[in-house]
Image: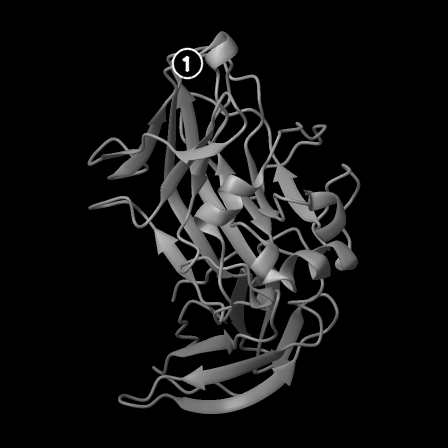
Amino acid sequence: MSTPSKPGVLKMRIRPIAASLVSGFVAAVAIAGSAQAQEFSADFTTDDDGFDLFEVNSDGTFSSGPLSHVMSGGNPGGFIRWEDLNSGAEEKLAWFVPSPSDVPVDSDLIGMVMSFDIRSTGATPARPVFIEVGDRQNPAAEGRIRCEFGVPSASWTTYSVVISPDDPCWRDFGGEDADASDFGGVFTVPELISAWVVSADFSPQAGELSDLDNFVLEEWVLGREITLKYKKRSRAFGGVVSQVDGAFPDVCVDTVVVQLFREAGAEDKLLDTDLTKENGKFKFAKNAKKNKQYYAVAPKIGEAPACAAATSKTIRPL
């Protein structure tokens, strides 16, 4: 059984980069109302999956920019690309923008994980990768939050962040740590919010190629592993539940349910249930039967983050 885990988070503390943001972009991609949050995945296999590209024009207004879909060479498969044709006085900042109907500004997204793959080729990156959401017309009053990572490389890199004030990557409009009130301001006034945006412009030089792949919004699940052994002398099964992820190191191993099963054809038999110790260890005082196979399960529990279900390898003790 596979056990999903939280994507690897790549973060760097970098001072926010200021940008002149105006109401034209708000009108272009404003969200009307709030939809129920749900998982979303865009791998750009066949098309652009509803994404758009916006540029800041020389007069400060926003417009839809050139976005191309490439069928191969992604991470893997297809991807979307922006080519920067301008430099100097004509240089424009650019953002990848998912469809607001697919990725709404919705408080139900808090506690989920957003991840994406980016690479930048053809120019020397000078600006960091970021993801941002907030009021682009009056961010000082209504709020805007941003998570910045390091500058991209010419090879695919995965960036990931939990949509939560508990994740230190998020910064408010003034560059301070975004707290619960910042998140509340952004996610409770959807009619003033533009949309989620992912940076696409990392260099002031013309000729830059910026690529995006595997934009994913999913439940935050911490991966777990479970081992099972049998001691013939004590006639007991035992093992340990361990947490794959570094975040919240005890939440998924301390005092959690573990179940012992014996394979029995169409429906395996549940033999016993135990709660782990604080170190994740558990024990079942059961005598193993000859030529029977056994395994242990730690069911999925919790939310934001949830603890993934884990199943041990099947063992035949005798």
Residue 6 in sight in this render: no
Viewer-side residue, 67 vs 231 = 67
**Residue 123 shows up from this direction:** yes
In the rendered image, residue 201, in percent from the top left (x then y), is placed at 48, 25
Residue under numbered circle 1: 86
Q: Which residue is drawn at the image coordinates 57% and 79% (left, top)?
A: 258
Q: Residue 137's spot in the image, x, y percent? A: 63, 44
Specify few, some or many for label 1: CA neighbours under 10 Å numbering under 14, 14-19, or 20 or more: some
- Give the quarter of the figure containing the N terminus: bottom left
Q: Is 111 situated above or below 286?
A: above
Please tell me whether residue 274 is drawn above or below residue 16 in the rendered image.
Answer: below
Rendering quarter of residue 12: top right
Give the residue at x 58% y 37%.
22
From the viewer's perspective, tell me whether residue 38 is left or right of residue 172. left
Tell which of 37 and 89 is nearer to you. Answer: 89
Residue 269: x, y in percent? Answer: 41, 91
Disc 1 marks which amino acid? Asn
Residue at 40% across / 17% down in the picture?
A: 208
Quadrant showing the C terminus: bottom left
155 vs 118, nearest the viewer: 118
Indicate left or right for 78 with 89 as reference.
Answer: left
Q: Quadrant of residue 184?
A: bottom right
**Residue 238, percent from left and from top:** 59, 74
Give above or below for 186 relative to 147.
below
- Tell me the SS state at disc 1: loop
- The residue sitting at 78% across, 44% down in the picture is 177
